[in-house]
Image (spheres, rainbow, N blue to C red):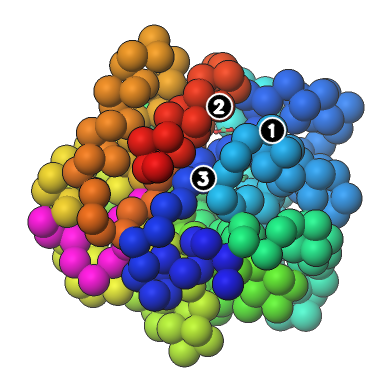
Amino acid sequence: MSNLNKILLNKTNCKSIWFMRQAGRYLPEFKKIRSKNQDFIKLCLNSELSSEITLQPIKRFDLDSAIIFSDILMVPYALGQDVRFTKGFGPKLGDFNLNEFLKIEENDFSNKLSPIYKAIDITRKKLTKSKSLISFIGAPWTLIFYMLNLKKSQGELNLLKLHDKKLLNQIIEILINFLCIHIKNQINAGADVIQVFDSWAGLIPKENLSEYCFMPNEKILNFCRKQKIPTICFPKGIKEKYEDFNKIVKPDGINIDPEIDPVWAREKLKNVVIQGGLNPNILLKADEDIIRGATKYIQTFKGIPYVFNLGHGLLPETDPDKVSRLIKFYRKFNG
Ligand code: CP3
C-alpha cells in the first residue's frame, strides 16, 4: 500500500510529504509546456502532457505523493459551462444556465472528462507503488463561487446572488451527484486518495456554514466511506469551525490552513490525520525562516500521524531550490 494511504487508513505514524500545487507555474519545466499550450482546459485534457506535468515534481524532488494535473473547474466545464483562464485574471466562467445544467447526462459528463481518467491511468502505471496518486474535486460551494460568479471584490461576496436558496440547494444536490461520479471514475482509473478542496468555505456567512459547507462535504464523504475511498478535506478559512467540520464530515485526513494554530489543531481535531498548515508565503523568505516555520509544525505533530504540506498551494514566485531544501530538511529532521 502506498505511504499516504497507510497513514490515512491505518493512522500509522509514518512520515509523508507532498505539496498542494506541486505541479505548476513555479517549475520551469511546467512553464515550458504551458507556453506552448495556451488553452489551459485543452492542456488538462491532454492525457500525455497532464501525466508528464504530474510527474515533473516527482522527478525533481523526494516527494511521497503525486497530485494529478487537472483543475477543480473541469467539472463545471463538463457540465456545459464556458470556462476560461485568462492571464492575470484567474478563471472566468460564462453565464450559468440552469436549463442547460439540468440537461447534462451522466454519460456525456464522464465522456468529456475521460482524458483525465486516462491521465490517471498512465500516471499510476509510471509511479512506484510506495507513492500515492492523489486526485481531487472542488466542494460544491467552492464550485458555485465560480459558477455563479459570486466574487464581488477581494474577500467580499456578492450576497444578492445568495438569496435564491431554492436554486442554490438545487445546484448543490446536482453537483454532489456529478462530483461523486467524478470521484468514482478517478478511483477506477487508479487514483489512491481524493482531496476535497473547499477553498472558499471561509466566505460562507456563519449562519449558512452548515447547509453550504458541512452538509455537501458530508454527503460526498458518506459516498466515499461506502466505497472505501481514502479522503482528505480542506475547508479553508473556517477558523474554529474546523472542529465541527471534522466531527460532522469525518474525513480520513484534514488539511489545516495558515490561520489555524497547530497546537489548537492537535488538541481539537481528533480521529483524523492532520495535513499541512505552513504558510506558502514562508517559502518566499530566507532559509532560516522556512526552517523555523517547518519546525513548528513538525514538532507540534510529533508522535501523531501528520502529513507535511502547506496551508495553501505553492505560489508561482516560489524558488524550486527552496522547495528542495525544505524537503531535505524534513527528511533529515524525521531521521
Ligand atoms: O499541483 C497541483 O496541485 C495539481 C493541480 C491543480 C491545479 N488546480 C492546477 C492549476 C489543483 C489541485 C488545482 C485546484 C484548484 N483550482 C483550486 C483548489 C485549490 C486552491 O488553490 O484553492 C482552485 C480554487 C482552482 C481554481 C483555479 N484554477 C484558479 C483560481 C486558477 C488561477 C489562479 C491560480 O492559482 O493559478 C486556476 C488555474 C490553475 N490551476 C493553474 C494551475 C497550474 C495555473 C494555470 C496557468 O498556468 O495559468
Could you say where residue 129 lies in the image, as x and y percent from the top left?
68, 64
Q: Secondary structure at mark 3?
A: loop
Q: Residue at x 83, y 30 (%)?
A: 33
The residue tagged 3 is: 18
Q: Amino acid at mark 1?
A: Arg
Determine if the magenta segment contains residue 271: yes
Mark 1 residue crowding within 10 angstroms, few (<14) / some (14–19) / many (20+): few
Assess whether mark 2 and mark 1 are in contact (beta carbons under 8 angstroms). Answer: yes
Depth check, front residue: 143 or 184: 184
Q: CA distance from mark 2 to mark 3?
A: 11 Å
Q: Secondary structure at mark 1?
A: helix
Q: CA distance from mark 1 to mark 3?
A: 12 Å
Q: Amino acid at mark 3?
A: Trp
Which numbered marker is on residue 60?
A: 1
Which numbered marker is on residue 324?
A: 2
- Closer to the chain start, of discs 1 and 3, is 3
> Which is more foreground, mark 2 or mark 3?
2
